[in-house]
Amino acid sequence: MTLATKHARDIAVAGIDVGGSKKGCHLVILRGREIAQVATSTDAAVLHAHCVAADVAVVGIDAPCQWGVEGAGRGAERERIACFATPTQARAEANTSGFYEWMFNGERVYRAFATSHPVLRTNRYEGAPASIETFPHAITCALLGRDAVSAKLKRVQRRHALAQLGFDVAQLRSIDDLDAALCAYTAQCLIDGRARAYGDANGGFIFVPA
C-alpha cells in the first residue's frame, strides 16, 4: 500500500528533539492523533531503528539540516523564523564552550537517517520517506497564531497547543517530549499539504504548520 492510498491515521510520523550528549535525543512517533511511542536515546542509530520498525514516513528534526555558509548564512534563518543562526562547520568546531554540541548531535541524527529518510530538498512533500528540519518555537507560534510566544511559558503553551489538536499530552512528561511531538505533528502537516517552507534548496528548508 502506498502513502497515497493510506488513510492519514495509518501513516506514522516521528519527531526528534535533539539535545546534548548527556541528555540525548527525545523521539515521539505519531499515528493520527495517537501517540504511538515515546523514547529517549543518546544513539542516533537507536532512534533510526525505532522509526524503521514503525514504518515512519517523515521525521521532523529539531536541529539544522546543514551548516551555514560564511558571509551568507541560511535563507530560512533570514526569513520570519526566530531561531539560532547556524554557524559554519569550521566556526562550530572552533568553539570551545560546548554550545554547539547539540548541532553536532543533530548532524549525527541526519546522517543515521540519510539512507532511509534523506533530507527533503524541495519545499513540499513528494511521497518518499524523508527527514525535515523544523523548530518547536516557530511551530508553537504558528499553532497559537502569534508572532512570538513566551519562553517562560513554553511548557504550558506547547502542552496546550498539542492538547487542542487532540493529543493525549499526559504521555508527554517533559518539555523535550512536547517538542518532539510538535516536530512530529509538523511532519503530519507536511504530508497533508498543510506545512509552510522557509528557506531554499541551497540553505535548506525549515518547515512549520501553515
Image (cartoon, grey):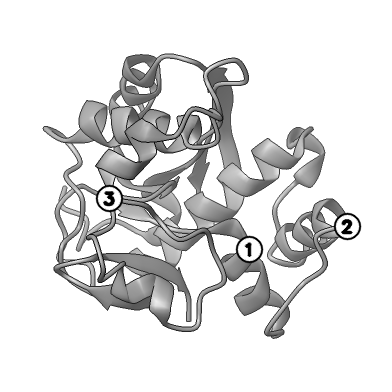
Q: Closest to the observer: 87 or 12?
A: 87
Which residue: 82% across, 39% down? 170
Tell us which disc is closer to us: 1 or 3: 3
On the question of residue 195 being in view, the answer is no
Q: Secondary structure at mark 1?
A: helix
**Would you identify the image quadrant in which residue 50 lies?**
top left
Cα–Cα gap, marks 2 and 1 = 12 Å
Q: Residues within 10 Å of mark 3 (few under 14, many from 20)?
A: many
User: Is residue 72 found left or right of 151 in the rendered image?
Assistant: left
Q: Position of residue 202 (x, y in %)?
A: 14, 68
Q: Which residue is mark 2?
A: 152
Q: Secondary structure at mark 3?
A: loop
> Which tag, 2 or 3, sits closer to the chain's start?
3
Cα–Cα gap, marks 1 and 3 = 20 Å
Q: Identify whether 82 is placed above or below 92.
A: below
Q: Amino acid at mark 1?
A: His
